[in-house]
Image (cartoon, rainbow, N blue to C red):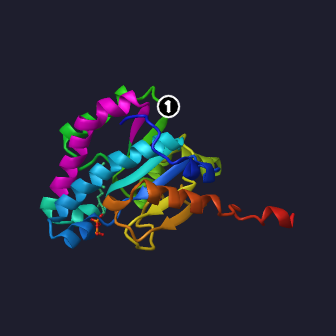
Amino acid sequence: MARTSSFAPLEQGELKVVPTHVAIIMDGNGRWARARGVPRVAGHRAGARNLRRVLRDVIELGIKVLTVYAFSTENWRRPEREVRALLSLFGRMIDNELDELKRNGVRIRHVGRTERLSPQLVKKIRYAEQVTQENDRLILNVAFNYGGRAELVDAVRRIVAEGLAPEQIDEQTIAEHLYTAGMPDPDLIIRTGGEMRLSNFLLWQGAYAEFYVTPTFWPDFDREELLKALLDYQNRQRRFGGLPSQQG
Ligand code: FPP
């Protein structure tokens, strides 16, 4: 992950507002593979390679938090072979990328449940989190075995276990019990592969996020595509439920 500047000056000049937290639903690996007549698993491998490239751009642009949806609680329903491939890809990504991510100031965080993951994979995840915990250039949240509803269930369970009274619970209490506690909400959620849905991703945190969908399949989502999404974002007027500022 070299730090050489690869953005054309014009592109950088156009980009004046960089969101703090970008979240990505990396969809379309399967269709990318089908279009090439290769197995779905090859699509996921290409997706993993692309994540590596996108990470480089995200760091360079100064985005502070990136959350990627790598494996949902619903993905267990896929054929066993594909599930196994995705589990092992995650482990291999940690093995292959950890040193470089560490060197580049990336803090790795897992968001999701650890149940059903092998003890070896959980150990790798915990190790990656531990050795990068002092990094602050970019927080990389890997949503793996993640579901927005499961996350809310887990938060409620913990709140109840802590014995909080109903009147002690407000929105901040919920936010502080999510996997993403202490992190800013996503400003922009990007979905590749063209589907117009959230698919159980960051249900609470995404309440006011801007949503950007591109038909491009994840393995083809390159620097130009990322810049297009960011330029689109900077032209949005975020109101958080209020009125446009000029209407005072
Ligand atoms: C959705 O495409 C993608 C996934 C379920 C997996 C995403 C995983 C990666 C990009 C690579 C691995 C990264 C880590 C951190 C393990 P799809 O299979 O639903 O595509 P389709 O809609 O075209 O079938």
What stretch of residues is rendered in magenta?
Answer: 83-109
Amino acid type, mark 1: Asp
Q: Main secondary structure of the magenta part?
A: helix
Q: Report ligand 1 position as a quadrant.
A: bottom left
Residue at screen point 58% across, 54% down:
187
User: Which image quarter holds the N terminus?
Assistant: top left
Residue at screen point 25% across, 39% down:
122
Question: What residue is pinned by disc 1?
Answer: 136
Quarter where residue 96 is shown: top left
Q: On the rendered structure, is 82 left or right of 156? A: left
How far across and down, in percent of the image, does residue 156 sit? 48, 52
Image height check: is 32 above or below 59? below
- Which residue extends farthest left? 81
Asked if residue 173 shows in the view, the reply is yes
Question: Closer to the camera, 188 or 54?
Answer: 54
Secondary structure at badge 1 equals: loop
